[in-house]
Image: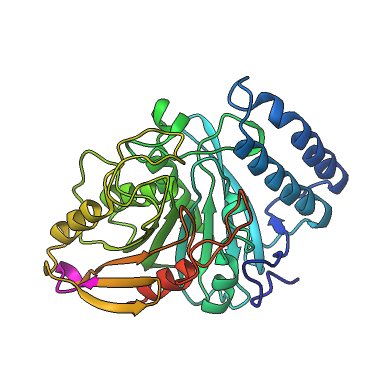
Amino acid sequence: MSGINPQSGPGRTPEPYRVARPAVRTLLVGAAVLTSLLVPACARDGERPTLRERIVERAEARARAREAERTAPVGDIASPGTHRFSLRHDGIERAYLVHVPRSYDRSRPLPVVVSFHGGGATMELQADDRYHGLVAKSESAGFLAVFPNGYSRLPGGKLATWNAGSCCGPAVERGIDDVGFVRAMMRELQSRYNVDPNRIFANGFSNGAMFAYRLACEMADTFRAIAAVSGTEGVSRCQPSRPVSVLHMHSRDDDHVLFDGGAGSGSRTKVPYVSVPETVSRWVRRDACQSTPRRVVEKPGAYCDSYSGCAGGARVMLCVTERGGHAWPGGVKITTGEPGPTALSATDLSWDFFNGR
């Protein structure tokens, strides 16, 4: 039984998700089609969905239809491929995907990368290699890739958001305990798979990046390092229990979360976002790093500065692209299909950072 082709990447379609419990193919196909027809009518509790929301909904409907048509029941959750799980936390049914690489050996502990989607997206879109290439990286590097779904009021978990403190959407408005959900998910994950507890990492995009920062503040006992893409810190209080390594990636022309702070023209949530320099400087202070960085990458359209001498062997690094907007570097924008920043790869950079390179 095969998993996702390790040669896949942005622009290629991964193999389907493996479901952790039996499913009926015909029922799934019908449900996927019905969902694609009903969701636009009920988006945002009766409000008319925006063009962006309709595009995201259609993209996910296609992904669900492919999954329903091609997925066969799989009993062994350790078999290569992507498995879907759900748990009930704080009275809410939550879901997450786990991609198991072909190299998984039950006797050998594997590192884990938990990847958080942006606001309004889903776990399926974050796990789609056409946009981020994270499943392919899991295969080539040999780590468990975990894709949780944020809080959603809609069928199938669409248009989900994370409670990152000051942002975003219904997750913040309703005070959703997303940190508690992640703790419960990690307990389940460690009971099912042979996880290396010293190599658990998180990355995220936009609202997912903001939530990764919150986890660095509140779950430093679990996450050794985070990589944040196009989303700055949004908590009012942060006292990590131990140093956490932080990689921040941002484009100077981001029109959602402005590099120098505030919400840009592309942001629907008018939150006074913390600037990139302020976010990075906070973690330089928290990790007790040297205040002067060293330039470790310089190439046309991009650079990276690294802060060393941090407590507990932690590191802080900032990578900046000149162009590409609000997008995953090296990936493809979900809403438009346009390439993000091309000077760097967020997927490769984050994995190298997690491994101390």
Instruction: Examine the rendered structure and indicate whether residue 113 appears above or below residue 267.
Output: below
> Is residue 233 toward the left or the right of residue 14 in the image?
left
Residue at the image point whose x is 73% and y is 48% from the top: 64
Report if residue 311 lies within the magenta region. Answer: yes
Residue at the image point whose x is 67% and y is 53% from the top: 20
Instruction: Examine the rendered structure and indicate whether residue 269 appears above or below residue 65.
Output: above
Q: Nearer the viewer, residue 328 or 163?
A: 328
Q: Is residue 165 visible?
A: yes
Q: Position of residue 77 (x, y in %)?
A: 64, 61
Q: Position of residue 298 (x, y in %)?
A: 33, 78
Q: Nearer the viewer, residue 114 or 265?
A: 265
Residue at the image point whose x is 66% and y is 42% from the top: 55
Q: Nearer the viewer, residue 168 or 174?
A: 168
Range of residues picked out in magenta: 306-312
Report if residue 270 lies within the magenta region. Answer: no
Q: Is residue 194 visible?
A: no
Q: Quadrant of residue 103?
A: bottom right
Q: How is the image coloured?
A: rainbow
- Which residue is outermost to the top? 46
> Is residue 213 toward the left or the right of residue 91 in the image?
left
- Which residue is outermost to the right? 26
Q: Which quarter of the figure is the C terminus placed in?
A: bottom left
Q: Nearer the viewer, residue 198 or 310?
A: 310
Residue at the image point whose x is 51% and y is 77% from the top: 141
Q: Position of residue 61 (x, y in %)?
A: 73, 44
Q: Which quarter of the figure is the N terminus placed in?
A: bottom right
Q: Position of residue 240 (x, y in %)?
A: 21, 52
> Is residue 294 toward the left or the right of residue 165 in the image?
left
Q: How many marks?
A: 0
